[in-house]
């Protein structure tokens, strides 16, 4: 990056005079590594390029977003279940301290926007007319934060700075204001930069600007300059991080370099990538591209690096090529097409992923989604192993759309779920461009893209500019794309209802199953070879089309996955007379949906309880990797300890309700046979209906549900006993659940009603868990339960103080009938929630219980419980206990050590180890939900 200083400055100012209407930022700064600070004197020349008269100017001050736990960034990270910034030490925080601010050499007031510490409002002393400019001078100190929060800041190696300087917000029919939310989408106008920075002599500065370095006696001066730039990144380290690759037209500076590739090979690959992008977009206006590993790692190539390294499914050349192409094409577009990435991100994502699809199609058309392991004997028969690398795009779209978790492409980026923002919405945008390519033709789309890029490079624009260009190049209707595909989450789904052969032609009835009318592509196939294809439009409900009868034996819709579709299983019909349209295929565990087969999956399963021992099962089901509405499961099992054949089954239908406040209704029936005591089994049969309500938004992690079920239990009894009402019974259960799993303040509650022949009762379970300002956990729970009527005998259906009877068999007890021994100490918090066993253990009238725990150190807590129990013909009983709780993984792995209770000082009593309780779950669903928080 070194050039003669005089030539560099001369060229820069000549270019500045040629385009005098761009903002200018000049920075003089000193880096102080002892205090992790940048001392900055900054000058901003702001041009009013709008038609409005401005009375104030807003500045983005994203370095201040690390100031404390009240900033939008900290709140955003909490929603993502990341609490490091919220509980960070003062030395790890970052902030901006403004010493002075003046406008046109006159000191002026300024203030932060309310609740947005990273936005500054600067009132102007004189109104700024269109085409006029004003000069803002600021002296400030930036305290550099730890890179643990967003990956930018102080790293283990040095300092990697992004969004570190104050910059004007964009005014375009109003101010575009945005706080830092860790989605790297700061909206800036093209700006001419000069940055002068002094660093200690043992430090090097690298950036995405031209550089001139001057060695001084006690420090090194770096002079950095760039024209029509945005997003200036500084890397300050004690060793140089970047490698330089000189390609035909552009120099690439990057620390994302291969360890096993020779320099000439890597340069050749980069040159090919740049020429490919240039073919689609046109000439890049800058002479260099800077690609840093930290930014690249936040937007990786999903599906490339998620498989374990020991499998080595992809060659090092392929991995580096695809990784660099994604990063390079992204920078190529973002550095020049200056859109509001929070509101108009879809056009950038669409372009970048379309280029990715085209690049893979041209240079790696035969590369499989699973790489080289697709040919391994244990995978080669799977449909997923036969998918090409580009097939991941429609697969991911189906994954979210079949679960109705997709969002419109115009949804603000800060309102997208993390999965949609990082993957699914990007893929949908890229597939949309490929959809347009197929429907309009290569020349129309590609020429529109090139014109859009060349005419708007380094200008602030919007997706509407692209719509105008492409609409002018075709007579075909494309309103469906911009109005429905982009602006809604309507789902495309067509099917072939009927095929009739008439003489030398074929009549095909195509039905639209959804509420979007979009073009469909019809194929004629000879086995899997394409013999015919044609686009059809305007199919709102049903339409019969006629095609010539040629040499093919199948007709299909969307055979090449040109466009994302909700369900592709019913997209084809055979022209041959067959009893079964699709043969049955058995597959181990799971697979992607195969349109040519009726798939049945078999899955080995191992579970355990004390009475059956190790349970070996084979689960037969019809659920592929992508969810389907009807789910069937049947699992015959062999119990090794009881030497019996047991099992379970379920049938479930998911009905999604898009236009209501209900997310889905689940109708189902399930049954199970297991042992509940030594050599005694039970059978359950449970029809149920669950109503899952929609969240306020997909970024909202709360859940709300209403469930009703009728539980039939038939218990086997010992030969010497007489069967009672406790051995064969039916209970109707109604539950309302609300869960807000916030990482700082978690709140959940449950209201329940149970009714049986001889009893009915109600209950409420309220739970609140909070982290204090010192990251100490506080856990509170209140339970109240009362019988409305109770004609039962004994305590089988009573409320339990230290252990719920679980007569509905819904808690995962490993030894549910044990009174002594290890498994009797298993604790699942329910009803009374006590850890100590007191003289009065049950309540057959009502119970009130309060459980609490307080953090002492990390996962060590002090717990305390109190309860009131009322039994018929007995006085009110007051119970209490306390002790130490080791809360290793909340509700998954915990250990309780009792101290004091109604029994006295338990720690000093005989047999104390028998009083220790534990929580342990082997439920894969619970563990998965715990670790996936903040992603989906």
Image: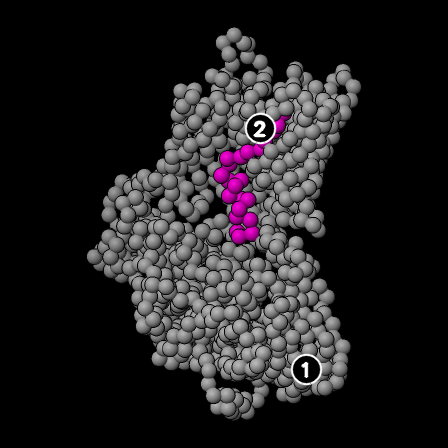
**Residue at mark 2:** 826
Does residue 517 appear to the left or right of 555 in the view shown?
right
Q: Position of residue 788 (x, y in %)?
A: 71, 25
Q: Residues within 10 Å of mark 2 (few under 14, many from 20)?
A: many
Q: Residue lying farthest left?
A: 551
In the displayed structure, does residue 537 sit left or right of residue 116?
A: left
Q: Position of residue 632 (x, y in %)?
A: 42, 36
Q: Is residue 640 above or below residue 382?
A: above
Element class at badge 1: strand
Q: Residue at x 32, y 39 (%)?
A: 586
Nearer-N-terminus badge (1/2): 1
Q: Is residue 934 magenta?
A: yes
Residue 495, percent from left and from top: 38, 52
Residue ID for mark 1: 136
Say whether marks 1 and 2 touch (CB < 8 Å).
no
Position of 440 compared to 881: left or right? Answer: left
Residue at the location (71% across, 31% down)?
A: 882
Vertical placement of residue 526 versus 630, above or below: below
| Residue extending farthest top | 720
Residue 673, label in figure: none
- Quarter of the view holding residue 770: top right
Depth check, front residue: 767 or 900:
900
Q: Cα distance, mark 1 to mark 2?
A: 67 Å
> Which span of residues is magenta-colored?
915-936
| Residue 544 quadrant | bottom left
Residue 676 picture location, percent across and down: 51, 21
Q: Residue at x 71, y 33 (%)?
A: 864
Q: SS for tag 2?
A: loop
Q: Is residue 377 magenta?
A: no
Q: Is residue 865 visible?
A: yes
Task: Identify which residue is drawn at 52% across, 51% down.
Answer: 936
């Amino acid at each position: 990056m070194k050039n003669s200083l005089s030539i560099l400055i001369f060229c820069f100012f000549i270019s500045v005079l040629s385009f005098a209407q761009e903002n200018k930022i000049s920075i003089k700064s000193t880096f102080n590594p002892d205090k992790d600070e940048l001392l900055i004197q900054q000058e901003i020349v702001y041009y009013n390029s709008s038609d409005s008269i401005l009375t104030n100017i807003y500045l983005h001050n994203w370095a201040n977003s690390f100031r404390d736990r009240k900033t939008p960034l900290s709140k955003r990270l909490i929603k993502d279940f990341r609490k490091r910034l919220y509980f960070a030490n003062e030395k790890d925080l970052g902030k901006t301290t403004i010493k002075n601010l003046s406008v046109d050499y006159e000191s002026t007031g300024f203030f932060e926007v309310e609740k947005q510490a990273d936005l500054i409002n600067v009132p102007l002393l004189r109104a700024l007319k269109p085409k006029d400019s004003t000069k803002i001078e600021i002296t400030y100190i930036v305290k550099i934060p730890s890179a643990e929060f967003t990956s930018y800041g102080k790293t283990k190696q040095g300092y990697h700075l992004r969004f570190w300087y104050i910059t004007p917000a964009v005014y375009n029919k109003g101010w575009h204001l945005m706080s830092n939310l860790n989605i790297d989408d700061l909206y800036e106008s093209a700006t001419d930069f000069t940055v002068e920075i002094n660093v200690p002599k043992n430090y090097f500065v690298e950036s995405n600007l031209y550089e001139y370095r001057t060695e001084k006696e006690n420090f090194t001066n770096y002079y950095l300059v760039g024209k029509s730039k945005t997003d200036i990144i500084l890397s300050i380290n004690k060793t140089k991080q970047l490698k330089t690759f000189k390609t035909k037209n552009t120099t690439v500076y990057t620390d994302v370099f291969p360890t096993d590739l020779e320099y000439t090979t890597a340069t050749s690959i980069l040159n090919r990538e740049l020429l490919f992008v240039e073919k689609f977009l046109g000439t890049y206006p800058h002479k260099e591209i800077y690609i840093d590993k930290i930014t690249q790692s936040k937007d990786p190539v999903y599906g490339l690096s998620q498989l374990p390294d020991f499998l080595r499914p992809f060659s090092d050349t392929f991995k580096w090529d695809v990784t660099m192409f994604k990063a390079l094409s992204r920078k190529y577009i973002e550095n020049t097409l200056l859109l509001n990435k929070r509101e108009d991100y879809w056009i950038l994502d669409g372009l970048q992923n379309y280029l990715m699809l085209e690049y893979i199609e041209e240079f790696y058309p035969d590369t499989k989604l699973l790489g080289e392991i697709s040919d391994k004997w244990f995978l080669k028969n799977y449909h997923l192993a036969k998918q090409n690398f580009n097939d991941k795009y429609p697969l991911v779209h189906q994954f979210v759309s079949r679960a109705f978790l997709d969002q419109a492409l115009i949804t603000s980026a800060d309102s997208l779920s993390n999965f949609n923002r990082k993957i699914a919405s990007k893929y949908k945008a890229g597939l949309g461009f490929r959809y347009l390519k197929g429907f309009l033709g290569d020349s129309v789309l590609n020429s529109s893209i090139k014109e859009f890029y060349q005419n708007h490079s380094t200008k602030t624009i919007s997706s509407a500019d692209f719509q105008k260009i492409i609409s002018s190049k075709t007579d075909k209707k494309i309103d469906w794309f911009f109005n429905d595909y982009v602006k809604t989450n309507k789902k495309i789904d067509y099917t072939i209802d009927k095929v009739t052969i008439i003489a030398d032609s074929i009549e095909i009835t195509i039905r639209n199953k959804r509420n979007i009318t979009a073009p469909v592509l019809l194929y004629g196939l000879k086995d899997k070879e394409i013999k015919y294809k044609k686009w059809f439009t305007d199919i709102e409900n049903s339409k019969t089309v006629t095609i010539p009868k040629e040499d093919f034996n199948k007709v299909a819709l969307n055979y090449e996955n040109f466009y994302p579709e909700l369900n592709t299983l019913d997209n084809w019909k055979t022209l041959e007379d067959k009893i079964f349209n699709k043969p049955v295929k058995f597959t181990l565990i799971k697979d992607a949906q195969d349109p040519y087969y009726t798939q049945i999956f078999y899955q080995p399963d191992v579970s355990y309880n004390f009475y059956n021992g190790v349970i070996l099962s084979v689960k037969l089901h019809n659920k592929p990797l992508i969810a389907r509405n009807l789910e069937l499961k049947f699992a015959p099992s062999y119990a090794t300890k009881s030497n019996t054949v047991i099992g379970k089954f379920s049938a479930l239908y998911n009905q999604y309700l898009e236009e209501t406040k209900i997310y889905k209704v689940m109708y189902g029936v399930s049954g199970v046979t297991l042992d509940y005591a030594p050599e005694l089994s039970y059978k359950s049969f449970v029809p149920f209906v669950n109503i899952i309500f929609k969240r306020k938004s997909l970024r909202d992690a709360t859940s709300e549900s209403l469930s009703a079920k009728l539980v039939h239990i038939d218990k086997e009894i010992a030969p010497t006993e007489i069967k009672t009402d406790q051995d064969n019974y039916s209970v109707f259960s109604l539950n309302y659940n609300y869960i807000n799993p916030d990482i700082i303040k978690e709140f959940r509650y449950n209201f329940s009603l149970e009714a049986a022949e001889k009893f009915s009762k109600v209950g409420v379970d309220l739970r609140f868990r909070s982290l204090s300002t010192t990251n100490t956990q506080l856990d509170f729970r209140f339970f109240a339960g009362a019988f409305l009527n109770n004609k039962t005998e004994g305590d089988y259906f009573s409320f339990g103080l230290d252990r719920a009877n679980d007569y509905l068999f819904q808690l995962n007890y490993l030894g549910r009938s044990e009174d002594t021994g290890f498994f009797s100490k298993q604790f699942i918090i329910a009803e009374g929630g006590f850890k100590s066993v007191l003289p009065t253990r049950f309540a057959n009238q009502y119970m009130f219980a309060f459980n609490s725990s307080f953090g002492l150190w990390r996962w060590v807590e002090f717990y305390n419980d109190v309860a009131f129990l009322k039994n018929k013909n007995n006085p009110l009983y007051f119970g209490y206990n306390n002790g130490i709780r080791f809360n290793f993984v909340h509700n998954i792995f915990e250990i309780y050590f009792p101290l004091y209770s109604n029994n006295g000082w338990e720690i000093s009593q005989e047999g104390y180890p028998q009083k220790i309780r534990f929580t342990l779950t082997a439920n894969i669903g619970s563990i998965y939900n715990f670790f996936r928080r903040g992603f989906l």
